[in-house]
Amino acid sequence: MTEREWDASRYDSAHSFVWERGRGVVELLAPKAGERILDLGCGTGHLTAQIAESGAEVVGIDSSEDMVRVASENFPHLRFEVADARSLPFECEFDAVFSNAVLHWVRPPEAVVDSVRRALRPGGRFVAEFGGENNIRTIMTAVGDALDGLEQDGTEVYRPNKYFPPLDEYVSLLESRDFRVAYSDHFERPTPLDGGEEGLRKWLRMFGWDYLAPLSPEQREQVVAHIENATRPTLYTDGTWTADYWRIRFEAFKTA
């Protein structure tokens, strides 16, 4: 859900944990037959389809054309559109807006919340999960150290700019935009990565491409190797890498 372009086929084949771990948020959403629900940042459509099984009418949107293309191929009976979370083309149309693993990618967060509010009908609910304070801290510390090393050698680098807020900060943001927060939680969710020894490397190629892409192939390998070596003592056990995820999950209602 940012201006970066996603490799949707790689995402769909190698990172299924994103939607498999999102099923708990669908349970919090508790979709009902006949409701109109917007899936904000639908990716390749798996959770959109799960929501649709309830009998709700679901629209999936994503800023990535490739994600929307693959979602439409995966679930041709559902509706998917390319749209920006900060400027949704909807006005009081949905009973609920759902989002999983997206909000930390999109800045400014105020624009997203305002856009969601416009899309909701009065009393509609916003249910989401995304990265919160301390999310992937071990990985991001290693990323920062690796990029520091390149900068010291004279290389211009791109710094990650993801949004991992404290829970109280995000709840305050929702309340300032006329949402009533009915439920909120900030919790640790260690997440095993697919791929065995290659698991972290594959994760970085998908979710760290914003800061890896500007580098030469040799520099990219240098950065990835540094991150692997720095995080291995805490994140690699018995042949599996585990990402140190912390998540925010909430349900909030539009008050007017």
Image (cartoon, rainbow, N blue to C red):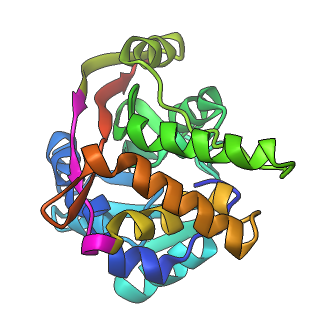
Residue 84 location (% of width, % of height) = 64, 53
Identify the residue at horizontal 56%, vertical 69% (top origin).
Answer: 81
Q: Nearer the viewer, residue 122 or 54?
A: 54
Q: Quadrant of the N terminus?
A: bottom right
What's the residue at 67%, 46% (across, down)?
147
Q: Is residue 139 left or right of residue 18?
A: right
Identify which residue is drawn at 48% across, 53% down: 227
Quarter of the image with the C terminus is top left
**117 over 173 or under it: above or below:** below
- The magenta stretch spans which residues? 187-197
In this rendering, position of residue 50 left or right of residue 38: left
Q: Nearer the viewer, residue 218 or 1?
A: 218
Asked if 120 appears above or below 193 in the picture, the reply is above
The verdict on residue 253 being magenta is: no
Total of numbered circles in the picture? 0
Give the residue drawn at x 70%, y 57%: 3
Q: Position of residue 244 (x, y in %)?
A: 30, 42
**Residue 78 visible to an observer of this rendering:** no
Position of residue 80 relative to residue 174, above or below, is below
Where is residue 217? Give x, y as percent.
Answer: 69, 75
Q: Is residue 93 left or right of residue 3?
A: left
Quarter where residue 220 is shown: bottom right
Q: Is residue 242 visible?
A: yes
Q: Position of residue 113 (x, y in %)?
A: 54, 30
Give the camera-side residue of 14 and 198: 198
Residue 162 falls in image quadrant: top right
Q: Nearer the viewer, residue 231 or 135?
A: 231
